[in-house]
Image (cartoon, helix red, strand yellow):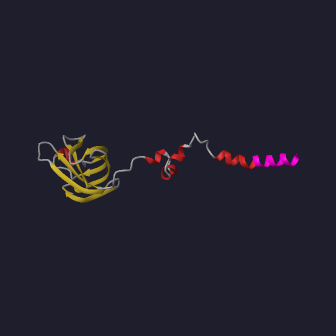
């Protein structure tokens, strides 16, 4: 009798892990119904695939209006890869009646293509032209430093900033056109 109880206990001990691993026939675990590729990834990892990487062409136009004179227009064009930062650095020294003055035009751009033919543009601009000959500008060095983030439509130009010089009647506008290259 002791042997029979021992044998029954041993059979129950060996059979219990196997029984615990098999689900009841009317209840299937959720992962068993999913294909192996889906079982390996959590729900957050199955987000929609990102858009294909492409290039974006940027045309940045700076219009510098000083008083009633003709505006000074500077244009910077560049092509940048989607989700990558591109930089342009332009600088030099210009001789003025007061000596040499640095002139600077620096652009940092990062464009991210989003849905519906739009792109998020992060743009940093530093613009320091030579001062005008007017008495109000001879003693100042005009300097514009901007950092902007905007959503732009493919192929459409947009005025993204307009600033005023604190010492003069000078106004500087920045327009950007983005073209998503497909």
In this rendering, does residue 108 appear at all? yes
Q: Magenta span: helix, strand or loop, mainly?
A: helix
Task: Describe residue 89's horizontal placement relative to residue 11 as left or right.
Answer: left
Residue 46 location (% of width, % of height): 44, 47
Q: Residue at x 64, y 47 (%)?
A: 21
Asked whether residue 107 is drawn in magenta, I would say: no
Q: Residue at x 76, y 49 (%)?
A: 11
Residue interval drawn in magenta: 1-12
Nearer to me, 129 or 86: 86
Nearer to me, 144 or 52: 52
Nearer to me, 52 or 73: 52
Residue 149 location (% of width, % of height): 32, 44
In this rendering, does residue 102 appear at all? no
Residue 109 location (% of width, % of height): 31, 52
Toward the right, the furthest residue is 1
Q: Residue at x 53, y 43 (%)?
A: 30
Residue 156 location (% of width, % of height): 20, 46
Quadrant occupied by the C terminus = bottom left
Q: Residue at x 38, y 50 (%)?
A: 49
Figure label count = 0
Asked whether residue 2 is drawn in magenta, I would say: yes
Task: Describe residue 92's horizontal placement relative to residue 17 as left or right.
Answer: left
């Amino acid at each position: 009798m002791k042997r029979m109880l021992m044998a029954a206990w041993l059979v129950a001990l060996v059979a219990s892990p196997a029984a615990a691993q098999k689900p009841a026939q009317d209840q299937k675990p959720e992962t068993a119904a999913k294909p192996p590729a889906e079982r390996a990834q959590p729900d957050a990892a199955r987000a929609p695939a990102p858009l294909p990487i492409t290039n974006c062409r940027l045309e940045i136009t700076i219009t510098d209006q000083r008083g009633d004179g003709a505006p000074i227009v500077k244009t910077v064009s560049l092509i940048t890869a989607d989700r990558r930062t591109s930089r342009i650095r332009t600088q030099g020294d210009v001789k003025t009646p007061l000596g040499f003055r640095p002139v600077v035009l620096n652009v940092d751009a990062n464009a991210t293509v989003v849905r519906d033919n739009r792109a998020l543009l992060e743009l940093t601009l530093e613009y320091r032209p030579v001062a005008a000959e007017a008495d109000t500008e001879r003693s100042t060095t005009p300097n514009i430093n901007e950092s902007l983030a905007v959503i732009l439509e493919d192929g459409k130009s947009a005025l993204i900033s307009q600033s005023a010089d604190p010492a003069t009647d000078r106004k500087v506008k920045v327009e950007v056109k983005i073209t998503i290259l497909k």
